[in-house]
Amino acid sequence: MELLTAFNVFILVYFALLNGTYLILSLTAFRSLRRYIDRLESLQIDDLLASSGGLPISLVVPAFNEAATIVPSVRSLLTLMYADYEIVVVNDGSTDETLEVLLAAFDLEPIVRVPTSDLPTAPVHAAYQGVRHQNLVVVDKANGGKADALNVGLNYSRSALFCAMDADTILEPDALARVVRPFLEDASTVAVGGIVRIANGCSIDGGSVDDVKLPDSVLVRFQVLEYLRSFLSARVGWNTIGATLIISGAFGAFRRSVVADAGGFDTGTVGADMELIVRLHRHCRDLGNPYRIEFIPDPVAWTEAPETVSQLGRQRDRWQRGLAQVIWRHRRMVMNPKYGVPGVVALPYYLVFELLGPVIELLGYAAFVVAVITGQASVVYTVAFLAIAVFLGSAISISAVALEEISFRRYRRFSDLLALLGVALAESFGYRQMSIWWRLRGLVAAARSDLQWGAMERRGLGRSAGQVDDPTNRDEAATEREVPARAADAEVEIIVTDHDVVAEQTVPK
Amino acid sequence: MISAIEEVLATDKPLRRILIVDDDPLIRMIVTKTIEAPGRTFETAGSLAEARKAMDATTDLVLLDLLLPDGDGRQLLRYAQGSPETARIPVVVLSGSGSDPIRQAAMNAGAAAFVEKPFDPNILSELVDELLAPSATAPNPSATGSSDSEGSHGTNVLLAEDDDLVAALISDRLARDGFEIRRVEDGESALDEALREPPDLAILDVMMPKMNGFEVLGRIRSAPQTADLPVIILTGRGREEDVVRGFDLGATDYIVKPFSPAELAVRVRRHTTVT
Amino acid sequence: MSGLVFAVLGLAFINLTFAALVVLLRLRNVRRAARLEERRRVWYPRIIGLISGDPDAERLSESVDPSEQSDVIEIAWDVARRLRGGDRSRVQRFAAPLLGVTIPDLEARRPETRAREVQIVSCLGGSDYEHSIVEFLDDPSSLVSLAAARALCQPNRVRWIGEVLDRLGRYGAWSPALTASMLAEVGMGAAPEMRVYLGDDRRPAYARAAVARSLALLKDAESADVAAAQLTTADSELVAACLRLLAVVGSEAQANAVRPLITDDRFFVRATAMTVLGKVGAPEDADLIVAAMEAGSAWIAIRATQALADLHASSELAALVNSGGLPAEAAIETLYGGAA
């Protein structure tokens, strides 16, 4: 009995901390977001960008079996409102006609292009360039997974900055300009992430989102809410204290030299997007260089969310596995003062509340139910549990909607606002529990494959499954593939010149 | 007057002859004083009859009051339009009333600009400067479509600009000068419109969604029905490379933002008038 | 039991209230937006009409209701920003009597507010406020200082370039591309002072590097000698920036200063010097360039082959094509624009 009570108290404390932290993040986000928007306005950003001679940037677009949609995607990328950029599409050994379709649509001719960095990757077959669009380059390579494709893109791009995205991400016309701004303002900026919004339900015209509305599917509505909470509450909040640990794989801008210096994207993990950011923190702090990693909510990328329960479940499962791998790989950083706020505050939070959270939450719900059924639940306890574990969670979701309301207000329709609020009220009564279940599955899967963790540490053979960190992996048939072992490690010595020129020199090991 | 001639002798620039037509000598004097500058010489006329005598092929600019003792100033406009050497002379109408019908009537009769009295001296001065400036660097392609002996009336301009405010500034200015504006917000629509119903001139912003101004320009030049279409591109400040690229692709002229709607109007007029 | 039900209902009620507050927030925003929209609908055409020749800026100013003054200022700013010269003056004349309502923002506590106001007075205030803007260069907030600097970097404010240059040390955190393009906005009128700054070794090196970039944007031919003179300084960023400036404005006169740098210890100095030598060097330099190519470096290879192309060293390039390996690939890319 006492054990159960003690456990119940522990659960209450846990939920209080969990939701309490999220509440603090939300409150921080309120102030921060408002201030950020004022700041943007005071910069007169259009002016700044128009006259600044914006920095050249390469868009790296990994594509695997995207024959149906790659041409409209690339077309829309060609029309971004940015003066100086190139598009590097990396065909990751597609088994459909992705490459053929590109060759035909854009009149591509084979070229010789010298890679300017030496990240080890799967073999590259050929490079092509658009005749009419000289800033479009397509690199054809053997399959190696998204991280590997990004590394190829990195090797073949020529700008000081690159933007990693998914083939089906839709960028708003000013997204590039906005995501580059922090690099202009602070030369020590290393990575910038923008907000990702859910395109389901919106009308899309010729590659851009015209009318923003909520989708009909309740499942997707829950996800819209989650994204709002995750981006506007959590990421803005974490960013305020300099603890941005995740930049979405669907849209992130990086300084090429630093990423190459840190080793590029890791092909051995499922959560390559978070893994890179955490590694960048580690790398820069190890070197003692001043650096900035930012999340900013004004550049927008749109992406499709899974519409069925099974797809969604698999996605969340995969995300949890990725999280586990990242934290395990960088466990040295946890509670390590050398790694500042990311190591001492953010990573422990992710470990305790995001990674282990599903276990504790599940046990918590179970214990609650047991206590109620066996009549041991005091009124105080029951009310406290419901308040802290259930209603507070809803309140936090409602505040995410409020955050959207004080900032970007993309959902103009009043009915959409009501729908979002409805979903926020209902979230803790079912959806959250489902989400816990999926994440638990992912955690178990990660724990069971711990035999492979050692292998991943060696950075040798790894397992990756096609577009693994594509959160919307629509390729149902993607199976686990073996990735060829990395080429004998050539050491890449990167020298950062001034802020914009990248210079590398490979020193054979 | 003498110093003006000296200036001309010193620099070999031709004298600019300006004719001021107003029955009020005070106005004539004020206008003269306002736009006096080296290289300019002035003549005055107090009536339609005098004005007809004074105006000829060597006149470079006419400032015309609508209310004259022996007739309506518009008669002089029509007189000027009647003969090729005088049709090209820019005429600035000065009027005590700026009401829309009068303004419209003046523009329809072929005025280059309309200034309401009492006028702002700076405005008038700048306007005259612009109208007297030597023509733009690019050669003037013949205008497509109808002959333009009636000035800007009915001249169709396609404006491709995504910034609503800039579009409004341009449309307002051009509409007052009698042009008909079709506005589109992105490159794709610009191309569609230009090919479907070729305008007399196109103004293309360089940075637009869906298709940028350069691509539109390139395609316009390769289509037979618009190959000779005069195109003015709008570029941002400090983008020299855009200007060069524009001319490479066949642009007729360019305007840098921040810009002057009045100057744009003058250029539009220039490129849509048969010389 | 009823207590429990009551408590749970109470909690649910709290959440519902919270949700209702958000709805009220939306309603407030919608109302505000509608009011703003209405004002815009009225005032944009009026101000645009001013530009096109409607007279009576003064009477128009007088008709502005005090409650809408700050919105009208905002609209006037929006319009004036897109114009220049006489047209902008018209809007300035209209806005001048109204500025009083926003001037106190210059002393606001929040830097964002001050920065915004600096830009407003810079655009709408004409030359009257220039002296205050110069003072804002020294504002404790770098956001405000940036706003002031950008406000002063206009062709018609070239007389203040010295003040901006004096504070360049403050903007070290910015990307030099930003600083450089800001300075270049002033136009060629600023070039003489910038040349002096570039040659002044008491100034911070990174600021001088930014100035060099700016001179490159302006394509200022007269700065070639100053740039060449800096090539012997220790600061690599400055050397690289001056090399890049020479790539744009250099000539044979500076070739001797550039030549030794293709074997400099610092990698990117070598790489940039190669590019410059291609532009200012003599045909004999082709051999030097080939000799300086390095086995493992793609960047050097690319820059070297491009330099050879600039020198029209076709035989050396042909030899490289046949040599194989990285130099061959780079040569092919340079020669055939990438086409295989």
Image: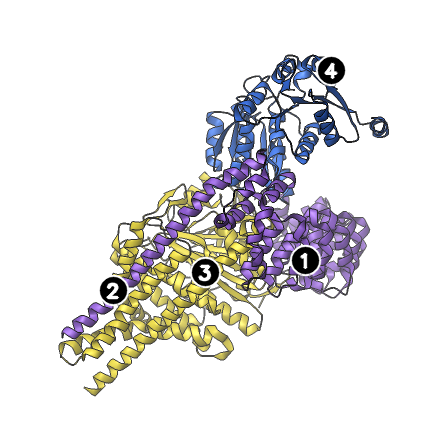
Residue A220 shown left or right of residue C268 in the figure = left
In three-dimensional space, the C-alpha distance between marks 2 and 1, rounded to whole angstroms, equals 60 Å
Does residue C84 show up? yes
Q: Nearer the viewer, residue A362 or A457?
A: A362
Is disc 1 placed on a helix, strand or loop? helix
Is disc 3 placed on a helix, strand or loop? helix
Single out the mark in the foreground, 3 or 1.
Answer: 1
Q: Three-letter amino acid code at disc 4?
A: Ala
Residue at which label 3 appears:
A34
Residue at which label 1 appears:
C134
Residue at (45% x, 61% y) in the render: A33
Name which quarter of the figure residue B253 lies in.
Answer: top right
Residue C221: assigned label? none
Residue at which label 2 appears:
A434
Is disc 2 placed on a helix, strand or loop? helix
Single out the mark in the foreground, 3 or 4.
Answer: 4
Q: Three-letter amino acid code at disc 3?
A: Arg
Name which quarter of the figure residue C339 lies in.
Answer: top right
Q: Three-letter amino acid code at disc 1?
A: Val
Residue at (33% x, 60% y) in the render: A226
Single out the mark in the foreground, 3 or 2.
Answer: 3
Residue B54: assigned label? 4
In three-dimensional space, the C-alpha distance between marks 3 and 1, rounded to whole angstroms, equals 29 Å
Circle 2 marks a residue in which chain?
A: A
In three-dimensional space, the C-alpha distance between marks 4 and 2, rounded to whole angstroms, equals 92 Å
Up-down relation of residue A256 to residue B133 (above or below):
below
Q: Which chain is blue?
A: B
Quick one: label 1, few (<14), some, or many (20+) residues within 10 Å? some
